[in-house]
Amino acid sequence: MDTQTGSARRILLVDDDGVCLAVLGSALRKRGFQVISYADPREALRQLQIDLPSAVITDMRMPHLSGLDVVREVKERLGAEAPPVLVVSANDEETMLAEAFRLGATDYLLKPVNDAELGAKLERALRPSRPQGFPTVPERIGEWAIGECIGRGGTACVFAATRKGDPIVRALKVVWPHLVQSTETLLRFRREIDTLSGLDHPRLVRFIESGRHGEWFFYVMDFVPGGSLRQRVRASGPLSQDAALTLIEQTAEPLSYLHRRGLVHRDVKPGNLYFDAQDGVVLGDFGLARRLPDRGVTLASEFIGTPLYLAPEVFRSPDFDHTVDLYALGVSALEALLGKAPLGEHDSVSLIARLLDQGLPRPRELVPDLSPAAGDLLDRLVARDPAARPRSADEVAALAREARAAGVR
């Protein structure tokens, strides 16, 4: 247990990972908070009524008690005096977050935690009158009638939406209002709009319009009815080799279009690969896209992106190139073939260390019955050395076609 004395607002941190505790603690102290840190959630709960924190930030996955247990115990032990509890997770599975909110969690953060988002959400949670769970979205935003939520993340949510006189369902993305107080979040959202509005390719989500409705910043794009690759694999299991090679070939097409224009997507992953009405792949979510001269991967001194799909060189230097997208495509295809992530580490710090020290397992070790051509392609896509990867998305598409023609299982 580690404490810092002083008169600042007191934040209780609970995480079994010492590195995460140190990183979060440092970020909070820089913002003027007093920090009490526990690696063991049982000890944190034993000291709860002595520490009497202003807020609790707890990891979701710990060996002795889970973050859900911490939320439950904080609310039960302190009752009406219970402080807000923010949960930290390595993923944004809606069922898990819904359970955390049901138990009384105030908000959540995704690993690796962005400093600006941490500050914004914590300040919001500490306000005397704070909403519980996700913000309530109005029935209409601008001209658009808001339907069901079809995708939710740490900074934004996507809703099905229609407008009068137009029966076609679109997808409307909003950034959570409390986060627009962060200049970085608003700039990132604005940059996403600027990027998407300048693109035109049949395998990229099509931009329609953007605007502001009161405190809600939004943009509208085509709705892709087939869901995401992640949803498909969870519902139906692993893809066949032929389907995975088709996925690689079709995803390479929009990546080639982006790369020729000097853009790197930087967030290719199963959750951002969608299927249209003809079952073709459509690439979406341009929140992290950058032009090649603007290669920095950090904002507020934090990594941006999902660690599993980030090429190892991204963690070492800002001097990476378009092949990071090809690496991410290889990881996504491997995950689709397995029906699960190719690495099981839940903690982002451990995952990054594994990727830097050892890289991913060889694709043939994970999927032994890969054809030689498919195995060779995946080997090259997820190579730790950027020079060993295919040099262009067009080359990837050609290799995928050749692998399919050579025979599939």
Image (spheres, rainbow, N blue to C red):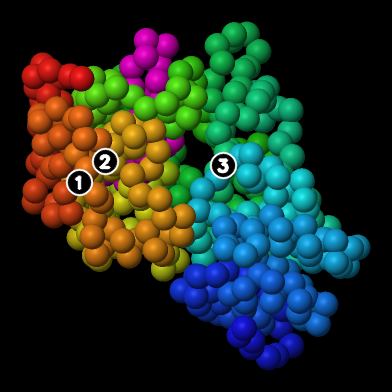
Reading the image, the residue beneath label 2 is 366
The x and y percentages for residue 236 are: 45, 22
- In magenta, the rendered stretch is 262-285
Reading the image, the residue beneath label 3 is 93
Number of other residues with Cα within 10 Å of mark 1, as a class: few under 14, some 14 to 19, many 20 or more: some
Q: In the figure, 409 relative to 310: above or below?
A: above
The x and y percentages for residue 13 are: 63, 72
The residue at the point 32 percent across, 65 percent down is 353
Tell whether label 1 touches label 2 (CB within 8 Å): yes
Number of other residues with Cα within 10 Å of mark 3, as a class: few under 14, some 14 to 19, many 20 or more: few
Whichever of callouts 1 and 3 sits on the residue coming sooner in the sequence is 3
- Where is the C terminus found, in terms of image quarters? top left
> Going by the image, does 127 lie left or right of 41?
right
* Magenta-drawn stretch contains 273: yes
Q: In the figure, 347 relative to 395: above or below?
A: below
Question: In terms of depth relative to the viewer, which is nearer, 190 or 38?
Answer: 38
Q: Secondary structure at mark 1?
A: loop
Question: In this orientation, does residue 82 appear?
Answer: yes
Most distant residue in the bottom direction:
5
The x and y percentages for residue 116 are: 54, 63
Rounded to the nearest angstrom, the CA distance separating label 2 from label 3 is 25 Å
Tell whether label 3 touches label 2 (CB within 8 Å): no
Whichever of callouts 2 and 3 sits on the residue coming sooner in the sequence is 3
* Magenta-drawn stretch contains 25: no
- Where is the N terminus found, in terms of image quarters? bottom right
Label disc, if present, on residue 362 of the rendered structure: 1
Mark 2 residue type: Leu
Rounded to the nearest angstrom, the CA distance separating label 1 from label 3 is 28 Å
The x and y percentages for residue 263 are: 25, 42
